[in-house]
Amino acid sequence: MCNPRRVRVRATRELAEAWAQEVRRRATRTGRAAGEARVRESLADSVGGPTLAALTDVLARLDGWTELPDGTFTHELDGGVITFDPDTRELEITATVSAEVTVTEEASTTVDAQVSGSIEAEGEGVYYDDGWGGLTAESAQRDAERNLSAAMDEAVRQRRELASREADAAAGDAIEREAEARAEAAFAAAAAAREDELRRAATDRLLAIGVQGRALFNAALAEAYRDAILAYARSRRAANLHHSEQDGVLDIEFELEV
Amino acid sequence: MRVKVRFRFNSVTGEVEAFEVDDLRDGPRLADHDARHDRAAAEVARIVEVNALIEEVAPGAGPVTTATTRTPAATETPAGEPERNRE
């Protein structure tokens, strides 16, 4: 055996191809749809002014109640919220039921792609002068041409693929925005379609929420009654002033000279 | 004339279960007894209730419990008014 000899073949191919291809994008929109049910009651015509004034101070100091920038007080409930507005003296209990909604939409269009220009490729074969291993000049020529053919096919494939990607990218952003817009619209429709069902569930939940909310509010109202009545009794120098709170029952007694 | 004020609020039910102003004075009634009693009852009642309905309970009629629902229910709940018992 001696040093190997090589046969190299080169070829140039002119490409001029055009085709239509589909550009498709998919967008998924996930969010929550919610249904609410609420009940309101005005305390302005029932609870006395001094008690309502005391109630604001009570809510400001009780744990769990949060004063919002607009002056209302809220307390989170298990699946809802209770709100009291000192200005309107309105109590509101809101039950909320939400569910995750996911929609997927597609958009597509057809674009033209094209590839043109020269493509060069090379193939190589190896042989030995003594024909070692069956590698002769003839076999080397065949190998070189076969390798050239494979290299040319690969080069063409890559050029086509590049052209395809470029055509896809050129239209892709617009199609993606269209798919996202469709998904947004579909989400809004799907969420709206679930709202009635969620509102009914919220109405059912309002019963339980109401019990929880009333218990919280009544506890605050008890403190407000106590503070307001005791303040009055002390201002009138009441005698035999007693008050107790047990098992959620507030008792106050005092005597006045009138 | 001395009166005793009793107030009871049940935070479990949200009801004012008792709100009474009792005359503690023994002996003959003062000439302006009713007026004084009414003023005292109204003054205390305004702390608890707007436009409280004040009713007199005759001696021996026994305690009268009045209830007021103050918090909302799932259906509209009318607000009641506390009453004053006078014995």
Image (cartoon, coloured by chain):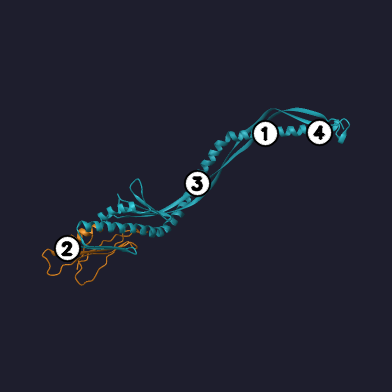
Chain colours: A cyan, B orange
Residue pictured at 70% horizontal, 29% vertical: A15
Instruction: Using the rendered image, report if marks 3 and 1 lie on a common chain.
Output: yes
Kindly identify the amino acid type of the residue bearing the numbered disc 4. Asp
Whole-angstrom CA distance, mark 3 to mark 1, is 38 Å
Q: What is the secondary structure assignment of the residue under circle 3?
A: helix
Mark 2 or mark 1, which is nearer to you? 2
Q: Earlier in the sequence, mark 3 or mark 4?
A: 4
Q: What is the secondary structure assignment of the residue under circle 2?
A: helix
Task: Provide residue A95's location: percent of width, then percent of height.
Answer: 41, 55
Quadrant of the rendered structure where residue B52 is? bottom left
Instruction: Using the rendered image, report if marks 2 and 1 lie on a common chain.
Output: no
Mark 3: give few (<14), some (14-19) or many (20+) Cα within 10 Å: many
Instruction: Using the rendered image, report if marks 3 and 4 lie on a common chain.
Output: yes
Q: Is residue A197 left or right of residue A221?
A: right
Q: Which residue is mark 3?
A: A187
Mark 1: give few (<14), some (14-19) or many (20+) Cα within 10 Å: some
Q: Which residue is mark 2?
A: B37
Q: Are marks 3 and 1 in contact (CB under 8 Å)?
A: no
Kindly identify the amino acid type of the residue bearing the numbered disc 1. Arg
Whole-angstrom CA distance, mark 2 to mark 1, is 103 Å
Mark 4: give few (<14), some (14-19) or many (20+) Cα within 10 Å: many
